[in-house]
Amino acid sequence: MVAHAYTVAFEGVDARMVEAQCAVTPGMPAFSVVGLPDKAVSESRDRVRGALSTLHIALPSKRITVNLSPADLPKEGSHFDLPIALALLAELEILPKDAVAQSVALGELSLDGDLVPVIGALPAAMAAAAENRTLVCPSASGAEAAWVGGCEVIGAKGLLDVIQHMTGRTPLPPCEPGEVTQGTVTSDMRDVKGQERAKRALEIAAAGRHHVLMVGTPGSGKSMLAARLPGILPPLTPAEALETSMVHSLSGLIEAGGISRHRPFREPHHTASMAAIVGGGRTAKPGEISLAHNGVLFMDEFPEFPRTVLETLRQPIETGEVMVARANAHVKYPCRFMLVAAANPCKCGYLSDPARACSRAPVCGEDYMGRISGPLMDRFDLRVDVPPVAFRDLDLPSSGATSADIAARVANARNIQAERFKDQPEMWQNADLEGALLDQTVALGEPARALITQAADRFGLSARGYHRVLRVARTIADLDAAETLTRDHVAEALSYRLPKSAT
C-alpha cells in the first residue's frame, strides 16, 4: 500500500497542491525522494530520519520511496519535511492514513524533532481552504495562516505534537489569527518648510495612486517629502491587506503572524540589481516592486539606477503585475505600486545655481536626465520641481496642512473612487482608468477640452500622456468633491505634465 500526504509548491503567490506518496517495499535499505526536488527537498530524508530517531522511531530495513506528485512541478524549500514525515509515518501505520490524507502539511524539521517556521503559510492556507482540508504547520506560522477564513489551522511545536494530535491522544486547538497592526507615523508633512507645490503633488498622487518624479538640488527636501508620504495614505482595505500579506509571506516579512494595515513603503538603494527590484534569482522570488504592492516604491537618486533596471519598470507600471521568467520557473507577481522617484537635476546637483554649477552646465543636466528614457519619463503622471528652501524660511514656524488633514482629503477622494469602481473589480484608483470607462468618467466640457487639445498639439503630448493628464484631472476633481471636470482641474493637471517653461 501507498500512504498519501499533501502539501503545496509555490508558483508566485499561488500555492499548487502537491501529493507526497510514500511506499515501503522490499529491497536494499534506502531512502529516496523523487519528483523534481531541489537540494533542500532532497536533504529532507536526512532531517526526517534524524527527527524520527530522536522520537525513537526506527525505520525498517527496506526501500523507502517518496514521490512528490506532480513529478514535473519543481519542488523548492524546506517545508516539505513535515509532509514527507507524515506520509512515512502513515505508511508505517503509526498514524492513521485518513487523518494524514485530510490535511495539508508544511514545516521544516530540526534533527531533534522540532518544527521550524517556514515562509508561505498564508498562501498555503488559501490552498488548503480551497481543498476543504486542515492545515498543519509550525506553531510560529499558525497565527499568520489563521487569517484565512474557512480553513482550520493546527500549529505544532514539534513532530511529536503532530503525532499525538492525529492519533487523538492530545488534540491541538486551532490557531488564532495574529494581531492587526495599523502602523505608526512619526513624521508629519507640516515639518517640511515651504515646498507647497510638491506637497500638493504628493497629495494628488496619494489620492489617485499616480506616479511622481521630483527633481531638485541636493538638500531641497525630496527624501523628506517622500518619507512623509505614508502618513497621508489611507490604511489597506481587508482585501488589499490579505493580497499584500501573501507576497510578504513568501518573503518571510510577516512578523508574529500579524497582518499590517499600513501600506508598504519600500526604498531600495540605487545599487540594487534587476533581480532585487523586479524579482528573480534562482527561485524567482518577488522583488521590491512586488513587495511595494498596494503601497509606495520610493527610488531616490533615480538616474543612478542601472539603465536596464529602470527599463524593466515600464511594463509593470502599466499592467500592475510582473512575470518573472527563469529556466526552471515562470511565475507572476502582483505589483500595483505608486512609484515616487527623486533626482538631482544634474550630476553635480546645482544646475539652476550659476554660482555653484559645474563648467559643463547646462549640457551636464541634459546628459544626466537623459539616463531616464523618454518612454519611462512618459509614465510619470506628475513631474514637480523641488527648489532649494531659503535659509530665512528654515527659521519660520511650521505652517500648512498637517499629515492628518491631508490624509482626510485623500481618504475622501479614495472613497469617491471606491464607489465609482464598485462594479469594476479590476480597477481600484483613478490610475487604473482606461478605455470606455475613462471616457465616461472624465467627460470634459468645451473649455476644458479646448485647453487640453491646445496643450497636446503645442507640446506634443503622446496618447499615453494625454490619458494620464485626464486621470490626474479626475483625481483633482475628486479632491474637490466635484462631479464634473472643469478647466481649472485640467489646467492644474497640465501644470504637472508640461515643461517648466510652459507653466
Image (spheres, rainbow, N blue to C red):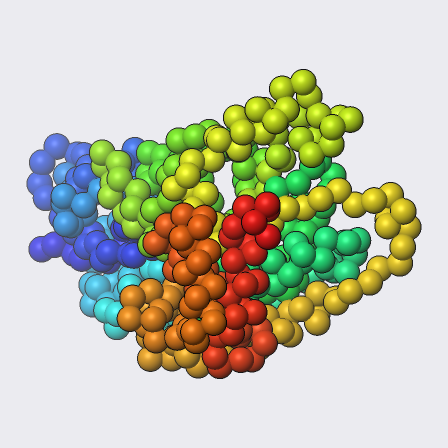
Residue 414 falls left or right of residue 44: right
Residue 231 in view, yes or no: yes
Quadrant position of residue 360: top right
Q: Position of residue 319 (x, y in %)?
A: 33, 54
* In the image, residue 131 above or below residue 456: below
Q: Which residue is drawn at the image coordinates 68% and 51% (left, top)?
A: 225
Quarter of the picture containing the N terminus is bottom left
Quadrant position of residue 436: bottom left
Q: Nearer the viewer, residue 390 or 60?
A: 390
Q: Position of residue 497 (x, y in %)?
A: 51, 52
* In the image, residue 338 above or below residue 216: below
Residue 329 falls left or right of residue 468: left
Q: Nearer the viewer, residue 291 or 477?
A: 477
Q: Nearer the viewer, residue 258 or 216?
A: 216
Residue 78 falls left or right of residue 297: left
How many marks overall? 0
Q: Nearer the viewer, residue 233 or 244?
A: 233
Q: Position of residue 449 (x, y in %)?
A: 42, 68
Residue 484 falls left or right of residue 108: right
Q: Which residue is drawn at the image coordinates 21% and 64% (left, top)?
A: 101
Residue 50 in view, yes or no: no
Q: Which residue is drawn at the image coordinates 16% and 56% (left, top)?
A: 3
Q: Which residue is drawn at the image coordinates 63% and 24% (left, top)?
A: 361
Q: Position of residue 395 (x, y in %)?
A: 91, 50
Quadrant position of residue 425: bottom left
